[in-house]
Amino acid sequence: MCRFVVGVVALMVTLSAAAPKSATTKPAQNAVVYPSNFPTPTETYSRFAQMDVSGNYFLFWRANSTHIHFETHVKTRGYVGFGISSNGNMYPADVVIGWVKDGKVHFEDRHTIGFYEPIIDDSQDWTLIAGYENDFGTVLKFSRALDTCDEKQDRVIKDGTTKVIFSYHPDDPIHETGLTYHGHGRRGSKSLLLLDLNPTVKELPADTKHFDMKNQQFHLPAVDTYYHCTVFKMPVLPQKHHLVMYEALIDPGNEDVLHHMVLYTCPGKMDDKYDLMQYHCYHEHDPLLQACTGVFLAWAVGGEPFYLPDNAGFPLGTKDDPRFLLLETHYNNPSLKTGVIDSSGMRIHFTPTLRLHDAGVLETGVMVDRFQIVPPEYESFKSRGYCSMECMQRSLTRSTAPEMNVFAVFQHTHLIGKGIKTRIVRNGTEIEPLIVDDNYDFDFQETRLLAHERKLQVGDAIITECDYRSKEKGKFTYGGLSTSDEMCLTFILYYPRMPMSNCLSLPMYGAYISDPGQREGLIQYLETLDWKNQTTRDMFQQNTDQSKYWLVCMDYAGPTSYFRKTAQPDPVTKPYVKPKSDWCSSK
């Protein structure tokens, strides 16, 4: 997710795709709020999900600052289970079990600690609102506080990814402590953003059009990782438009090989001969194509359609907007599957009914490079990417406004990432982070709409911090393009659009080497050390944190706007401490 070159570092960031095209007028949308296969809930919910593949378990929910309300529709006349787990497993977990028998609703707050019946909690903190059976099955409505203050038997529902577990059985229990095992085929887990504000479905303006950029029956080679690129000429628009929604179009059956897709802007003038040009993204040396580095949109596995807020849209159709986009699709094929033909891609929805602000995307984090090093044996190793105060100032002082209004964030790392957060440092004092996800799920990567817009200004620096668990991996992990490599990136969606598109960094490891040309020697040396030794692990984390970094930034104008310096990251003189909640003490 970053495509420019830094000195000896080939930065070409990650993700890939390809593309046919079509621009079609969308009829006025009297939007169907729920997909046709969904049962009808008892009230309107902006968030909903099908929990299982077979369509037997459906969840609807809504939340505010203190409580969350759920409604489950399950195709059973027996008991229904629902819960929250730290790891997606059935235990340990905070669960509820409910059923309807002889017209009476049974519902209890429980917890699991092993492969046996969930234990009834001492404190009943989930509240039943309603329960009944209908033609579909069993319906349960219930609510709870985000923090029930039951530290021993409940789990706090936080911002970020929540691992939701579910189960059901065709029969009612004999009594409250006589639950029959649900069986392997009637249980599961799903990662959800329970506190996310972005609606699952939202009505678009009646004059909205859409434009598809799809691979045209691309024959995927039987290789572990492949990046397929297509240059795409944008449709000629008679006036300025705003992009208001985007979504992935995934060929059924190819979900297991599509890892992520990114649309990049191509600056300057490009000849029409580039339209629909296809190639391996990182084997092409045409300087015009290498200049396609500004992130326009990004999608990764698990991502749902994203609706921009009503006050902002990505501009299209003006002289300052790109005539060409580069669609890059990353295929992840570790089983070396053969015979895959793919026509997946992206769809953008745009309207001539303009919003108040032009939106932009800023890519921040760690440069995608082998010099991002994560040794084995860590329960927690922190990689940090810095967008310097100087880069922010260079861009904001050339912008139409002195500050950025951030409305959404997309965070991205790979398989050993267990958490990621985007931190803000203002003149040395760290303030509340933009976003925190302590339960990162590689298979569930969503663009998250913030509950409240956040302002970034001159004097701010951004830190993308990825928390890696390499305990059982047994070998080094390096930054790179493959899924088995690592990344640490944040894409910040904001308005008004400013010149800068990328702001990244890479550690220089000055405690070990004095010249970038010694990088491979450093890697060879590190691989000889005993990483089971705590002192070795602590020393490497410390040396990485205290290293000088390559600090780089670049505008949408491409490599001609490239700025780089080698320096210590901006100091954090006062770390952020989350205020202690008085919620539990006031109950």
Image (tube, grey):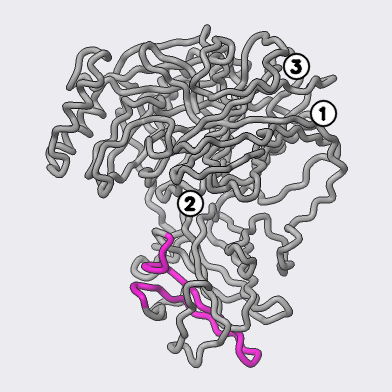
At mark 3, the secondary structure is loop
Q: Residues within 10 Å of mark 1 (few under 14, many from 20)?
A: some
Residues tagged 3 and 2 counted as in contact (Cβ below 8 A): no
Q: Residues within 10 Å of mark 2 (few under 14, many from 20)?
A: many
Q: Which mark is residue 161?
A: 2
At mark 2, the secondary structure is loop
What residue did someone put label 1 on?
352
Sequence-first tag of 3 and 1: 3
Q: Residues within 10 Å of mark 3 (few under 14, many from 20)?
A: some
Give the quadrant of residue 229.
Answer: top right
Vertical arrangement, residue 282 with respect to residue 83, above or below: above
Residue located 51% across and 78% down the image: 97
Viewer-closest of 531 and 31? 531
Sequence-first tag of 2 and 1: 2
Viewer-closest of 245 and 103? 245
Q: Which residues are magenta?
A: 88-115
- Cα gap from disc 3 to disc 1, whole angstroms: 12 Å
Residue located 41% across and 18% down the image: 10
- Cα gap from disc 3 to disc 2, whole angstroms: 38 Å
What residue did someone put label 3 on?
318
Magenta stretch encompasses residue 99: yes
Residue 527 appears in the picture as rendered: yes
* Amino acid type at mark 2: Thr
At mark 1, the secondary structure is loop
* Amino acid type at mark 3: Thr
The image position of residue 157, as x and y in percent, is 47, 58
Q: Is residue 450 left or right of residue 29?
A: left
